[in-house]
Image (tube, rainbow, N blue to C red):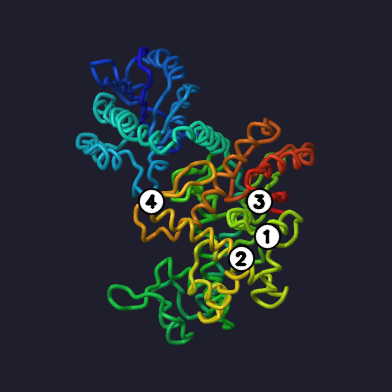
């Protein structure tokens, strides 16, 4: 193994909570090419309940794994697992999960099993391990029984990298992006391990308020407003349109349609509509925000989420356990308007949130070469005022102008825009037409992106990363992807800059929520870092548009 150029590594653990030490590494599998001998592999059980190697093997492995280029699948998890036995790799590393996402984000699953089956024709054997797990539990598997299963994972990781993913990445000129991608994944790893404190009492209070209010709403309505119970209210009483039908021919009230019905309800002057919205608001806030935070809190009072750089097709981050990407902006909504207060900071520190202003709109203006918008952004004027005046007829329609702008940039069609604005589809068609006349450059850029995606099967972001469209039918999403994905790439580079040039023990990056970066800063230093951070986040002159970042104290 010492002579190997690169080593594939996989870890077996007692569970998934390795970031806070509640779970830990049981063993390490490795695989590597050795000349004409082909693939060599081994499994080193070190902390199973039985059948372990002598603990001194860790001391032999440590200098090798810390000095060699390594390949992982799901690199963050393996690094966090290795840390539980004091091994900290610091040479060049690769991740087949992330490479698979870069090479083709359209692949349905990026799991090792799925990729190995689809790309290598391999079907992993789990029979013996599954039998033992079913009978006695995963944590009790002896080291010798884990051997073949674990070695095979390392071998598959090595083959996926060497035979498929790295050659394909080089063919698409994505290999030159890898060092930045690795730095970003390691930054996310650092953010996760640090975690962010939860105000557990605040969450408990909000849960109690929410559950009480939801019951009150049920009493007022006379039924529980779940999707299956809403048909009569929606279609008989409120006369809402039927969006789609189930295979059985009934109105469909699935998650996607319910999001559209929420928009319709928000424009209806009816007490029952408001009650349904309030119930659904509390239901989501209680389950997905407050209770989820409590369910995932570590013994030290922090949550350590899982940020997925491979979680969305456009390249935007997704987040689970808990999903901190869905922390809403402050608002007047009683159910989640103050949700940021669920998360707090160490004594002597305060939270600063640096949030890009109209990031995607600015990118759209830059790609569309819209001089009037570029001038507005350069002067730090309100970009939604011209739309409010020209499309809707007055400054008082600024919020409608903002809604129309972002609905358009996110690819919403006539029907969705009619729901979002609370107008009929004929009126929606008119405002879309006027918006198109006001900013033809944006539509021209969108049309160009669509044609390019349809003809060659992909478009490039400003970094060179690709968004693939193997099916030309979906090429109309290309410009939206360029904007969303380009924004995600910009935030990524900004985070790396801030971490490298600003962060230290007195200023820690603890969170990112879409277009914002949250820093935990020592109180007496907070004012001094605001302008340097803003400068790092806005210094992207290659776009020809002025970027803007707002800074607010978290939750204030």
Q: CA distance from mark 4 to mark 2?
A: 27 Å
Residue on which the image places disc 1: 373
Judge the density around disc 4: few (<14), some (14-19), many (≥20) Cα neighbours within 10 Å. Answer: some
Judge the density around disc 1: few (<14), some (14-19), many (≥20) Cα neighbours within 10 Å. Answer: many
Give the answer, above or below, for where 322 lies relative to 172: below
Q: CA distance from mark 3 to mark 1?
A: 17 Å
Mark found first going from the N terminus, 2 or 3: 3
Mark found first going from the N terminus, 1 or 2: 1
The residue that appears at 45% across and 70% down in the rendered structure is 258
Judge the density around disc 3: few (<14), some (14-19), many (≥20) Cα neighbours within 10 Å. Answer: many
User: SS of the residue at dot 3?
Assistant: strand
- Of badges 3 and 1, the one in the foreground is 1
Name the image quarter holding residue 118.
top left
Quarter containing the C terminus: bottom right
**35 lies left or right of 22:** left
**283 lies left or right of 105:** right
The residue that appears at 40% across and 16% down in the rendered structure is 61
Residue on which the image places disc 2: 439
Q: Which mark, residue 356?
A: 3
């Amino acid at each position: 193994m010492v002579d190997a150029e690169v080593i594939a590594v996989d870890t077996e653990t007692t569970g998934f909570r390795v970031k806070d030490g509640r779970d830990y590494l049981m063993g390490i599998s490795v695989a590597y090419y050795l000349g004409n001998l082909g693939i060599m592999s081994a499994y080193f059980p070190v902390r199973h309940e039985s059948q372990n190697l002598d603990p001194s093997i860790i001391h032999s492995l440590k200098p090798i794994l810390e000095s060699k280029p390594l390949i992982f699948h799901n690199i963050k998890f393996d690094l966090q697992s290795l840390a539980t036995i004091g091994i900290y790799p610091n040479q060049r590393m690769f991740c087949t999960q992330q490479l698979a996402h870069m090479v083709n984000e359209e692949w349905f699953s990026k799991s090792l099993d799925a990729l190995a089956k689809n790309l290598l024709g391999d079907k992993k054997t789990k029979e013996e391990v599954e039998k033992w797990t079913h009978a006695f539990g995963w944590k009790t598997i002896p080291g010798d029984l884990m051997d073949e299963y674990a070695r095979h994972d390392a071998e598959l990781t090595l083959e996926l990298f060497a035979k498929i993913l790295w050659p394909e990445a080089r063919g698409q000129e994505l290999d030159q992006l890898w060092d930045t991608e690795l730095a970003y994944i390691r930054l996310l790893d650092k953010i996760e391990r640090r975690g962010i404190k939860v105000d557990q009492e605040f969450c408990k209070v909000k849960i109690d308020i929410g559950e009480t209010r939801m019951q009150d709403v049920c009493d007022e309505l006379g039924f529980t407003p779940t999707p299956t119970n809403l048909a009569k209210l929606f279609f008989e009483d409120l006369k809402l349109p039927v969006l789609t039908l189930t295979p059985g021919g009934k109105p469909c009230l699935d998650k996607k349609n319910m999001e559209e019905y929420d928009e319709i309800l928000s424009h209806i002057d009816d007490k029952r509509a408001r009650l349904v919205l309030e119930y659904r608001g509390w239901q989501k806030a209680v389950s997905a925000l407050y209770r989820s935070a409590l369910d995932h809190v570590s013994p030290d009072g922090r949550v350590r989420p899982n940020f997925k750089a491979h979680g969305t097709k456009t390249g935007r981050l997704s987040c689970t356990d808990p999903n901190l990407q869905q922390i809403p902006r402050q608002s007047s909504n009683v159910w989640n308007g103050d949700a940021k207060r669920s998360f707090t900071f160490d004594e002597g520190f305060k939270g600063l949130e640096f949030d890009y202003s109209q990031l995607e709109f600015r990118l759209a203006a830059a790609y569309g070469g819209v001089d009037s918008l570029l001038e507005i952004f350069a002067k730090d004027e309100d970009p939604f005022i011209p739309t409010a005046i020209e499309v809707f007829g007055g400054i008082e329609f600024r919020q409608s102008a903002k809604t129309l702008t972002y609905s358009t940039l996110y690819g919403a069609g006539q029907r969705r825009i009619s729901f979002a604005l609370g107008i009929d589809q004929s009126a929606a068609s008119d405002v879309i037409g006027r918006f198109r006349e006001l900013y033809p450059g944006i539509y021209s850029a969108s049309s160009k992106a669509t044609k390019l995606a349809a003809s060659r099967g992909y478009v490039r972001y400003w970094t060179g990363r690709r968004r693939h469209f193997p099916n030309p039918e979906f090429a109309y999403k290309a410009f939206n992807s360029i904007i969303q994905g380009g924004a995600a790439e910009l935030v990524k580079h900004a985070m790396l800059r801030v971490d490298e040039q600003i962060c230290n023990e007195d200023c820690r990056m603890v969170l990112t929520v879409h277009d914002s970066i949250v820093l935990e800063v020592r109180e007496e230093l907070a004012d001094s870092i605001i302008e340097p951070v803003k400068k790092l986040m806005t210094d992207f002159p290659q776009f020809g548009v002025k970027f803007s970042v707002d800074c607010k104290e978290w939750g204030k």
